[in-house]
Amino acid sequence: MAAGTVRIMKKPRRNLWLFAAAIAIVVGAIVAPAPADADPNVTAYPGMEIHQGDAACMVGFVEPELRIALTSGRCDVDPIVTDSRARVIGP
């Protein structure tokens, strides 16, 4: 480029970004699994055996107010979490 030459860069196309965002939202809505209905009578507790698909893990910590449980092992293969009696605990 010669000295003193000004190069003008093109602005990104807004319509292309909007189209890409719309496609991402539609694909996300189609691919996302439906949430499972958890059994309200099942309570997770530390030491409890849980299952996700073919994987079995143990609950290590439970935070009841946030409704989360931390597990040991590799228990993230299926979005549906069940107890040892196949009752759904949650997604």
Image (cartoon, rainbow, N blue to C red):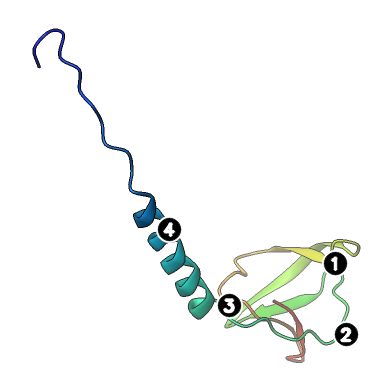
Q: Residue at x 64, y 64 (%)?
A: 73
Name which of mark 1 and mark 3 comes first in the sequence.
Answer: 1
Q: Is residue 12 depicted above or below 15 in this figure? A: above
Q: Is residue 36 left or right of residue 7?
A: right
Rendered location of residue 83, percent (x, y): 76, 84
CA–CA distance in space, label 4 to label 1: 46 Å
Real-space CA distance between mark 4 and mark 3, rounded to the nearest whole angstrom? 32 Å
Q: In this figure, what is the number of numbered marks?
A: 4
Indicate the quadrant containing the C terminus: top left, top right, bottom left or bottom right.
bottom right
Tag 4 and tag 1, C-beta contact below 8 Å: no
**Relative to 13, is 37 on the left or the right?**
right
Task: Give the residue at mark 1.
Answer: 46
Does 86 sit above or below residue 89?
Answer: below
Mark closer to the observer (4, 2): 4
Quickly name the residue at label 4.
18
* Residue ID for mark 2: 40
> Disc 3 and disc 2: Cα gap in Å?
20 Å
Q: CA distance from mark 4 to mark 2?
A: 41 Å
